Structure formats: C-alpha cells, structure tokens
Amino acid sequence: MCGIIGFAGRENAVPIIVEGLKRLEYRGYDSAGIAVYDGAKFAVTKKKGRLAELANEVDTNPISGNTGIGHTRWATHGEPSDINSHPHLGSGSRIAIVHNGIIENYKQLKEWLEGKGIKFVSQTDSEVIAQLAEHYYDGDLIDTVVKVTAALEGSYALGIMCLDEPNIMVATKKDNPLIVGISSKGNFIASDVPAILSHTNQVYYLDDKEIAILTNEEVKFLNMDKEHVEKSVETISWSLDSAEKGGYAHFMLKEIMEQPKVLRETIQAALAGGDLIEGLDISAFNKIVITACGSAYNAGVVGKYVIERLCRVSVEVELASEFRYKDPIVDDKTLVILISQSGETADTIAAMREAKARGASTLAIVNVVGSTIAKEADHTIYTSAGPEIAVATTKVFSAQLILLYILAVDFAVKLGKLDIEGKERLLAEIGALPDKVNEILESIDDIQKYASQCIGYKSIFFIGRNVDYAIALEGSLKLKEISYIHSEAYAGGELKHGPIALIEDNTLVVAISCCPGLKPKIFSNVEQVISRGAKVLFVGTDSVDEDDKLSLIKLPMVEELFSPSLSVIVLQLFSYYVAANKGLDIDKPRNLAKSVTVE
Ligand code: F6R
C-alpha cells in the first residue's frame, strides 16, 4: 500500500527521498511523487508507473530543496495517473501533503469545499486533505492540522508542509503506520523502517492522533490539544544488509534462503528463559480463535491442527475480514490469536479491536516491532525475521509456524496434556527444523529443474490432508500470487466431491504427504488423479516410485505436526522458480501490496 517518506535536513532532500521511495517499493504501488520546498515554492514531480520513471524525471529536470515529502501510491480512489499521484497541493499551492489511508467522508468534504469555489484537480480522496488544510490555514500549521484531522473520517498517515512555514514538516496518523527517524544530517518521517535505515536506526513510533513537528535540528511531539508528548527513541536492530538483495536475483529468494537463520533466531528468542507469555493463563480459556489474512491465515490453519492435537482445546480459524462482520462468538473465556507480519493489516486490526470489545484476551504474533497490532494486543510475541521485503511472505510465514508450535507445546504443558519428556522431545524436534530446512535448500537444483518444466500450466492443484492440507493452502496462494497461474488447494478427501471434475490430461497436482498415517489415503488421491490424466509432484517424507506421471521431492524425516516447516520450503521454491522462469516481477507482483492497510 502507499508509502511515505519525508526529510527535513541540511542537504538536498531529493536523492534521500528517491532512495527512500525505492526502499518502499515493496509495499506495492502504481505511481510516485516528490515535493520539496525550493526556496520560493513547492517543486513537484509526479509520475505514474515504476519509480525509475520518477527518478529519471528528477534527473532530467532536477528539483532541489532541503525539506520535502515523497510518496508511492497504490490507487484506491481514482486511476493510477500523474495527476492522482501524491504529493497533493491545495489550489493556492501553499500546502503540500502525502497521505496513506482512506478518507471515508471525502465526498462530503469535497462538496463543501467546492461550494466555496475551491477547484479540485484529481479524483483522489487525499486531495481533500490538502484543500481543507489550505482553507483552514490562518498562520499556524499545527492549528490547521488539528482542525483538519478533526474533520477527517477514516484512516491516515500524513506528511504536511506549508509554504508559509517552509522549514517545518508536520506528521500525524490514525490507523496507519508512521515513524519518525532522527539523525545528524536531519530528521525523517516514513511509513516503515527500511525507508530510512541507511540514514538512521533511531526512531520514534508515532501513536494515533499524535503530531510530530520536524525541523532540520529537532523533533517535537504534541497531542491534539497541542500539549507536549514525551516519547522515547528506539534503536532498530535490523541491519541494512537485511534490507538489501545481497547478490540474490530477488528479495524473495534471499528471504527463502535466510530461513534456517530466521528459524534458529525465532526459536532462541522464544525459548530464552522465563515464561513465553507472561501473565497469560491458558487454563482461563475454553476456546481459542486464530484470526489473520492471507498467508498469516494459512499459518493459523496449521496452528489449529497443532494446538488442537497437543492441547485438546477447540481452535477456530477465521479470516480477519470475515471475523469482524460475523457477530463473532467470543467473550472473556476466549483467547484470540492475531497473526500478522506487518502488524498493520486493516482487517486484522479491526478483528483485534472487535475481539477486545467483546472481552476476549488477545495475543499477537507479529514481525514489525512498534506496529499497531504489536502495541494494542494484550500480549505480543515477535517473529525474529528482520524486514521482509518481497511482497510474497516466506521467512515470516516460517517464523509464524515456529511460534505456533512453541505456543502449542507451552499451552499443552500448562494444560497438563504434555509431560516434561513429551515437551523435551517436541522442543528437540522444533530445534532440529533449521538444519532440516537447510538440507532442503541444498537440494534446490532439483526443485528448480522441476519448476522450469511447469511454466505452461494454466491451472495447478495442491492437495493434502491434515497439516499437509494447511500447507497446500499456502503453496497454492504462493504460486498464484507470484506466477499468476490459477491454482486451488483442496483437502485430499474433498477431491471426489467436486474438484476431480477439473482434472484432465496434463493437469498438474502437487500432493503433500508428511503424515505417515495418512499416506495411503493421499496416495489413493494421487492414483485417482493420475488415472484421469494428471501429472503429480509428490512432496513427502516417504518414497514413491517415480515414472513419467509421478515425480518425487523427498523431505527429511520430521515429527508430522511440524512438517509444514519443511514442505512449505519446497512449495516456496517451486513457486519462485515457476515465476522466475516466466520472467515475472517476483518481488512486486501485480496488484498486490505488502501491507494491506485499507479494508
Ligand atoms: C502472501 C502474503 C499476504 C499476507 C497478508 C497478511 O504472500 O504475504 O497474504 O500474509 O496480506 O499480511 P500481514 O501478515 O502483514 O497481516
């Protein structure tokens, strides 16, 4: 979704903003723009399309200034175009803004302003903020920001500049992320850490309805009553390397290859002494609900199988976008687990707030420190995965699985369903996963070779049973989002209830089989589809006899409950190489955004 970067400093802001925008590309965008105060006016450059177009434009027709704002836009209101790109200016060109979020009452505000003779130039909801600010401005930008935000309904992270106070930049937010970075060369606002990590690792996390005022020397924070707010600066531990490709063709491949390390660090952090989640008494709940979106939801489906098996507690998994509108049955006896890489997914935030309003306790599994979900949930545990740049999640998904396994073991012990020996055995199995993942990564060539033959398929099916079904969901999602090949995942047993009608000559079916007790069942599904003309890629811990219809990728032996951590690696690599062989923009698949901050 949209990305914001702003700089108030002692050097030309333009290259800093262009670099920051590059590091925000992964969030997904269709146009980009910059506005800087050039000593007399706002110099603005905006371009539809890839960031290279904008960079090219500012090279050919340079603009410069020490204070400026930049934006990558993911269109919601109005098509991607130069004019709809941000920054937006008021019609007197005295106020410039960048906005991430959605203004729900923009139509009413626009009509009201148009009634006063103000002319709008774009189709966006965001322009209303610039026009309203200019209309309200009476010599004090902070007063203006207070008035404007009081009038806005919806979500926003905002960077605002005013020609009459050219040396300050003002930022505020509601329900969308914004950080403030400080450095010796100047101060920054940004949607997230990678945008400014090459300049500083010292950041403040802005809370909703706080105002940050930046000059080239200092940063101050106020609330909406213009009272001073004391905030503490945080040091980001992510290294700059983690936000660079490091010689890999794509961030996605780099992040896949990082998984043994990520798993090790996530395990270490979770088991580093003390209670996993202080103050959470699992015996106080009679039900667990896991809610999330996309891949994080798929991790939740794995979590359901594992927690139910080990703890004998009923676990429901709900799509966060459905949970909030279904009058969910949760109360103070329910533990609601939120899973989110970004911690900013609008539907997951809304589900968390809905659950809290109904008295449930909330536990978040989050990657981004300081994110909304991390801060608002009653309890938070972190995936130690570092920044994930590729839109398609890989390493964070794997880290989420690890935390769900460890949680399940912890809960099972506390509920008296697992003795110490059982606990030690399962933790040892979890501890062995990073090396086993490494083993799979060493046989990457086999997967690459197989995937290179699969680019012509129009449709690919994934089947599995139990945790293998859960991971089939993730394999199918990964494939469709980066390779644009249609794909579906089914529980093996469901095939003959409908989907088998789609199987014909040369359909590809990927069958996952890591549950020894269910191998005969999934194998009979494999035989059923082969006899109808399908080809099958069998991903499993057991051998099968290969022939021209059946190929095998064999996984190391593993406790079946934790096998998704191995099978998913094969599925990630399979999708990656199919997409790479099709020459696609793997890190930034069409229409997708890394962090879905609007509903
Ligand atoms: C798919 C993917 C998405 C996210 C989903 C939730 O590869 O990355 O499906 O899992 O948008 O995002 P977070 O985890 O940030 O809440």
Image: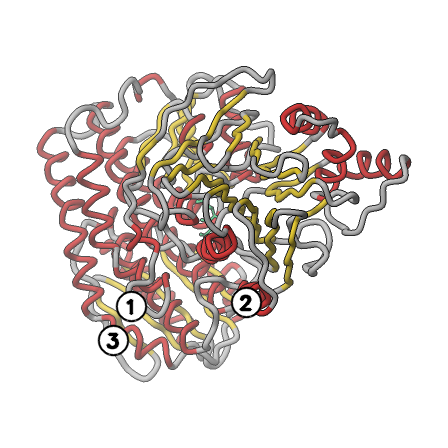
Q: Residue at x 73, y 53 (%)?
A: 78
Marks 3, 2: nearer the viewer: 2
Marks 1, 2: nearer the viewer: 2
Res 445 label: 3
Q: Secondary structure at mark 1?
A: loop
Whether 454 is drawn above or below 389: the answer is below
Q: Is mark 3 within 8 Å of ligand 1?
A: no
Label 2 sits on residue? 59
How far is mark 1 from mark 2, CA to CA? 26 Å
Q: Residue at x 49, y 40 (%)?
A: 189
Q: Residue at x 28, y 55 (%)?
A: 241
Sooner in the amino-acid sequence: mark 3 or mark 2:
2
Q: Are marks 1 and 2 in contact (CB under 8 Å)?
A: no
Residue 504, horizontal then vertical, whole percent: 50, 77
Among all residues in the image, which is located at the extreme bottom? Answer: 548
Q: Is residue 134 left or right of residue 249?
A: right
Could you classify mark 3 by the number of other residues whose Cα lies within 10 Å: few (under 14), some (14-19), or many (20 or more)? Answer: few
What amino acid type should be assigned to the residue bearing mark 1?
Gly
Residue 256, horizontal then vertical, whole percent: 30, 60
Could you classify mark 1 by the number of other residues whose Cα lies within 10 Å: few (under 14), some (14-19), or many (20 or more)? Answer: few
Sooner in the amino-acid sequence: mark 3 or mark 1:
1
What amino acid type should be assigned to the residue bearing mark 3?
Asp
Residue 200, horizontal then vertical, whole percent: 35, 43
Could you classify mark 2 by the number of other residues whose Cα lies within 10 Å: few (under 14), some (14-19), or many (20 or more)? Answer: few
How far is mark 3 from mark 1, CA to CA? 18 Å
Q: Residue at x 70, y 30 (%)?
A: 152
Q: Secondary structure at mark 3?
A: helix
Among all residues in the image, which is located at the extreme left? Answer: 421
Residue 409 occupies which quadrant of the picture?
top left
Whether 360 is drawn above or below 583: the answer is above
How far is mark 3 from mark 2, CA to CA? 42 Å
Res 247 label: 1
